[in-house]
Amino acid sequence: MDGNDGGDGPVPARSVEGWVLFVSGLHAEATEEDLVDAGGAFGPVARASVVLDRRTGYAKGYGLLAFASWAAAAAARGGLAKDMGGAVSAEWAFLGGGGGGKRRR
Amino acid sequence: MESPQPAPGSSPPPSGDVFLHYSTTHSGRYGRESLTIQVSPTGRLSYNNSSGYKRGTPIRKDVTLSPAVLVELHRLLAESGVMELSDAAWPPPSGVGTAALEVVLDGGSGGRVKLRTETIGSLLDVVASTDADGLRVFYYVVQDVRCLIFALLGMHYKIKPI
């Protein structure tokens, strides 16, 4: 099973197209292209989406980034925040069941 | 692998303790249609969509959201102004449809709200009502919650909701 990052971190759940990161802290003018460009540094991006604020039309501040490859997703999770700068953080969007139930916070 | 470690003296990490239940029903030419979204503080997202359209079978999805997603949802709700709303002056649920939203932040210490009204078809319905400002906040927070959930479900299951 490659769905474990080896540490005490959360165990992500596999999505239909691979492994999905939840990217938050995006700039109000961030686009899907920005996310694809930034994610592409870690491997081929399967899908990207930046959600817009329904009232203002600007980016709501978060997006989703999917990689088919586990290695690329794990690398992007560790490195995307540094690459995109500012307040950006990248975390798994979905957690696995089974042993993934125990959560701190 | 680094986890976000707040510097000493900085603000505490943002909360992701959120309970949300949203449902909307509509009775019309396709029978009684309903959509339900529930997020529990453990991260469990339950999504239900049943419609008589094209004799569609109900769609049910359950997935666990990560703490990062819960923090974003918590932030979205806390910043939306929805926690200050009251449905006292809103149109009551009609025979056509109901929209209901219940939110509890931080086990209640961050606010608790339970709102019910008739299904809002468009912003024009909002503008015509007595508590237009409150209904407008409700309308947009519902849109934003639906956008977040549909974006997540779309990525996880490749569902393309209408």
Image (spheres, coloured by chain):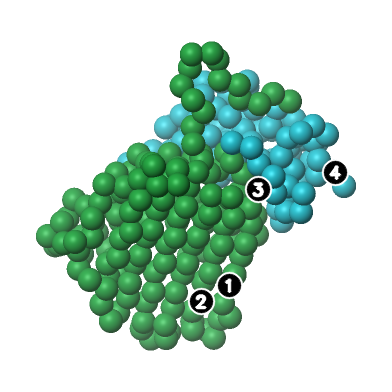
- Numbered disc 2: what chain? B
Q: Residues within 10 Å of mark 3 (few under 14, many from 20)?
A: many
- Answer with mark 2 or mark 1, whichever residue precedes in sequence: 2
Task: Give the residue number, with chain letter if any, for mark 1.
Answer: B59
Dots 4 and 3 on the same chain: yes
Is there a contact, CB below 8 Å, between mark 2 and mark 1? yes
Q: Is residue A83 visible?
A: yes
Say which chain is cyan: A
- Numbered disc 4: what chain? A
**Residue A3 in the figure: left or right of residue B69:** right
**Residue B88 in which image quadrant:** bottom left
Task: Name the element at disc 2.
Answer: strand
Is there a contact, CB below 8 Å, between mark 4 and mark 3? no
Q: CA distance from mark 4 to mark 2?
A: 35 Å
Q: CA distance from mark 4 to mark 1?
A: 29 Å
Q: Which mark is residue A94?
A: 3
Task: Name the element at disc 4.
Answer: loop
Instruction: Name the amino acid type tagged 1.
Output: Ile
Say which chain is green: B
Image coords of residue B160 (percent x, y): 56, 62
Is there a contact, CB below 8 Å, between mark 4 and mark 1? no
Q: CA distance from mark 1 to mark 3?
A: 19 Å
Instruction: Name the amino acid type tagged 3.
Output: Phe
Instruction: Name the amino acid type tagged 2.
Output: Ser
Q: CA distance from mark 2 to mark 3?
A: 24 Å
The residue under the point 55% across, 43% down is B69
Q: Residues within 10 Å of mark 2 (few under 14, many from 20)?
A: some
The residue under the point 70% across, 49% down is A101
Dots 1 and 3 on the same chain: no
Task: Give the residue number, with chain letter if any, for mark 2.
Answer: B50
Q: CA distance from mark 2 to mark 1?
A: 6 Å
